[in-house]
Amino acid sequence: MGTSAARRAPTTRLWRQAKGAATRYLSPEGGGVVTAGEVAARYLAALGEGDRGVLAAFRLTRKVAQDLGALAAQATSQGWDGALELWGLGELAGASPEVAAQAVGAALVGPGGGLEATVARVSVAAVLMKSASVGHKSPPEPAQLAQRFLSTALHFRLALDLGEPLEAVAATCSRLRNGLDELWGCIEAAGTALMPGSSPPAEDWRSLAGWTWVTEFMDALIKRLSDASR
């Protein structure tokens, strides 16, 4: 596996540190010295290397989170069928949760390729299926859905980028799965702890207010996880 940034080979000092932390994290000889939090922190440091910073690596992800929040807000006021109609997805009325979730992911992300787009599509489907959202009579709160999506996308990106060293040292599939579950728990806990008291009004999710809320949340999540290495 290579870096999802895909702009350079992952051979810089920070990428070596991230891979080293992942190796020690699941290595039998590691003895639990490296925590899931440190792995996440080292990964974010490597992903954000350069002038643009780590937020730039999640630009498309943040746009999808904004649109997902808008969709949930529309579903709250107009029901899922009405919200899906607004997004040109009226044919999904009555579809199975799996089909609907995947179609929503494809619609929100668009046809673009690349790892970030792929992760965003899968993450939208994952959070919608987990919450049984599409078609449900009581749509989730928009900010909570956007928050969970951002945390999920970060976890999937980390798992893909550091999957090779994690898989190489995990003695069993269950150890690898448990390690990934711990990483998810770490990211999820950080995201949940950052949930603000309020989110943009329904009509503002697709405006600057929605973009600002999503960006501020993602920035806070990154900083909170990055503190684990200090």
Image (cartoon, grey):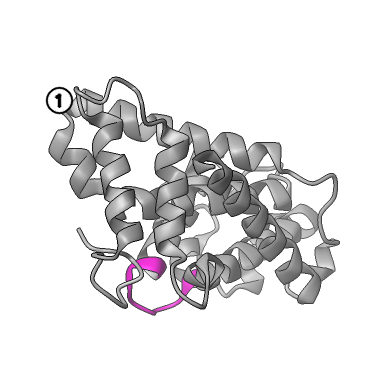
Tell whether position 114 is magenta: yes
Q: Is residue 48 left or right of residue 65?
A: left
Tell whether position 90 is magenta: no
Q: Is residue 25 left or right of residue 35?
A: left
Q: Is residue 52 left or right of residue 72?
A: left
Query: Is residue 101 at all visible to an observer of this figure?
Result: no
Q: Count how many numbered circles sit on residues in the image.
A: 1
* Badge 1 element: loop
Residue 20 % position (x, y) = 26, 45
Amino acid at pointer 1: Thr
Instruction: Identify whether 222 is placed above or below 187.
Output: below
Residue 75 % position (x, y) = 71, 56
Residue 148 % position (x, y) = 58, 46
Residue in the foreground of this view, choosing between 73 and 29: 29
Q: Residue at x 83, y 69 (%)?
A: 203
Quadrant the N terminus occupies: bottom left
Q: Residues within 10 Å of mark 1 (few under 14, many from 20)?
A: few
Instruction: Identify whether 111 is placed above or below 43.
Output: below
Instruction: Report the magenta residues as a range.
Output: 108-116
Q: Residue at x 81, y 55 (%)?
A: 199
Q: Residue at x 44, y 39 (%)?
A: 38
Residue 213 % position (x, y) = 75, 62
Picture quadrant where residue 189 is located: top right
Picture quadrant where residue 67 is located: bottom right
| Residue beneath disc 1 | 172
Instruction: Identify whether 157 is placed above or below 110.
Output: above
Q: Residue at x 69, y 36 (%)?
A: 193
